[in-house]
Image (cartoon, rainbow, N blue to C red):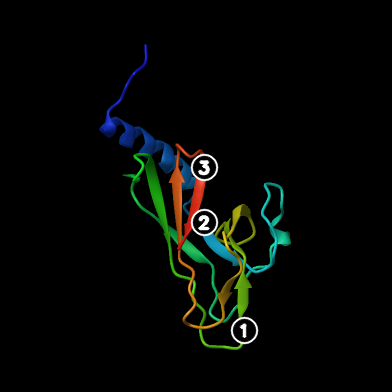
Amino acid sequence: MDLVGNQTWDLAVTANALEAVTGVLLANKVALYQNDIIPTPNRPLGDYTEADYSGYAKEAITWSAATLADDGSVEVLGIVGAFRPTPSPIVNSIYGLMLVDTTGVILYAAARFDAPPLPMNSTLDAIVVTVRVRIAAGGVVVTVS
């Protein structure tokens, strides 16, 4: 016999599972990297060269409540502040991002942008990140706009 839940059930059960996942990610930050490498599961944090453009800082993730995505899957959105340079001579070309702990010494995941590098040369440049956690997808999907 299979128990078939309705949408209320799906949201409640998945929200509890996602809460456990985001609990691990809750205190994490997003960092940018500037070297031309491709992330792999065993690549250590030391292989990534963190961004250092003027005004750069790791950004905290603020998590939403569980919601339904456009495709009907349940997800939790992680909103990250915009990365934007301040006027100064230090510029970078950014290849991807990393999810790190609040101290920046533990690497949890990394992703390379679809069309790197992204310039961070002036106050007109910006990188906006949304982290989507979906149980259906089996992990973390990072969308950059």
- Is the residue marked by circle 1 packed among few (<14), some (14-19), or many (20+) residues within 10 Å? some
The residue indicated by pointer 2 is 28
What amino acid type is highlighted by mark number 1?
Answer: Ile
Q: Earlier in the sequence, mark 3 or mark 2?
A: 2
Q: Amino acid at mark 3?
A: Gly
31 or 36, nearer to the observer: 36
Residue that numbered label 1 is attached to: 90
Q: Nearer the viewer, residue 109 or 104?
A: 109
SS label for mark 3? strand
Residue at 39% x, 47% y: name it. Answer: 76
> What residue sits right under mark 3 in the picture?
139
Q: Alpha-carbon distance for marks 1 and 2?
A: 26 Å
The residues tagged by marks 1 and 3 sit, at their Cα atoms, a distance apart of 35 Å
Q: Position of residue 10 (x, y in %)?
A: 33, 32
Give above or below for 143 relative to 84.
Answer: above
The numbered mark, 1 or 3, whose residue comes first in the sequence reads 1
Q: Secondary structure at mark 2?
A: loop
Give the quadrant of residue 15. Answer: top left
Q: Left of 110 or right of it: where is 68? A: left
Q: Relative to 26, is 116 on the left or the right?
A: right
Question: Which of the 4 image quarters holds residue 100?
Answer: bottom right
In the displayed structure, would residue 81 be above or below residue 11? below
Image quadrant holding the C terminus, namely bottom left
